[in-house]
Amino acid sequence: MANSMNVSCITSFLSRFQRQLRIRQLLLYCALTMVAVSHLFPAKSFGADFPRRKKAQLNSAPALSKTEQPVPESAPVSEAVTNGVDLSATDSTNRMANLDDKHRLAIGDKLSFRIEEDLEDPKPMMVTDSGDVEVPYIGRFPAEGKTCKQLAQEIKSALEKDYYFRATVVIAVDLMTKSRGKVYLVGPVRAPGPQEIPSDEILTIGKAILRAGGFTDYADKKNVKITRKGSGGHDTKTMIVDVDQIFEKGKTEKDLALEPGDLILIPERLVRF
């Protein structure tokens, strides 16, 4: 009886020892496999390859302070960060500050668009009939009536909300459309009707009336009404301009610049003599 108990204990001990030995062998095999893989596929410097990756691709990475942010290999740390100030961000701001701030984009304008952090060639885009441009990651974005500088700043803000830590947006006009739109003259002028707004010129109320051949004899020059629709066709605005002071007294500061879609209504004088 005692012999059978001893044999059972020995058998149980050997069984447990074999299981522990198999587990240790498996752990050793896994460790050796990981070492081999690390030698075959060495890890690259994530920060050096993608210094400004999109937020969506870095959600799992721990947040870094400004001074710890990775910089491109081509730029020494002393040039990119000095005394805690990110000079690359300053350069980005300076580049965008130099964008055109005079020409207002019109339907048909052909543009070039680039996000410098992507390190890619400029992409062509055009202001569509709806007044929008197609922006990567965002989609349709309102552009008509804005300058390149204004549009770039708005797109930059939209990209940095969800897609980029920092986005340097560069937009330039490659080809202007011949016309920015039309204005419409109604009333006692020699040639009432629509007039094109040249893309390379600011069309004022005075110029528009002269192009229409000037006033007729019974025009009320002092109460020319301009009706302008707000963004999205809402909030219509009405302005009264004394064109007589522009023509007779040379007060060019009253010569209002027109915008596409403006309706110019010239009333007739109540008293004719």
Image (spheres, rainbow, N blue to C red):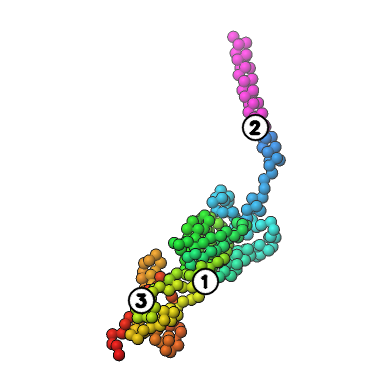
Residue 42 to residue 53: above or below: above
Q: How far from the left and from the top, in percent, is residue 170?
A: 57, 64
Residue 28 to residue 1: above or below: below
User: Dot 2 corresponds to which residue?
Assistant: 27
- Residue 186 badge: 3
Q: Amino acid at mark 3?
A: Val
Q: How far from the left and from the top, in percent, is residue 136?
A: 53, 56
User: Dot 1 corresponds to which residue?
Assistant: 103
Tag count in the figure? 3
Report the Cα–Cα distance between label 3 and label 1. Answer: 28 Å
- As rendered, which of 166 and 121 lies closer to the eye? 121
Give the mark nearer the N terminus: 3 vs 1: 1
- As rendered, which of 243 and 233 lies closer to the eye? 243
Residue 248 to residue 10: above or below: below
Q: Amino acid at mark 1?
A: His
The magenta stretch is 1-30
Q: Mark 3 against mark 1, which lies toward the viewer?
A: 3
49 sits to left or right of 256: right
Q: Mark 1 against mark 2, which lies toward the viewer?
A: 1
> Dot 1: within a 10 Å radius of its alpha carbon, few (fewer than 14), some, or many (20 or more) residues?
some
Give the mark nearer the N terminus: 1 vs 2: 2
Say whether residue 68 is visible.
no
Q: Secondary structure at mark 3?
A: strand
Q: Residue at x 49, y 56 (%)?
A: 139
Give the mark nearer the N terminus: 2 vs 3: 2
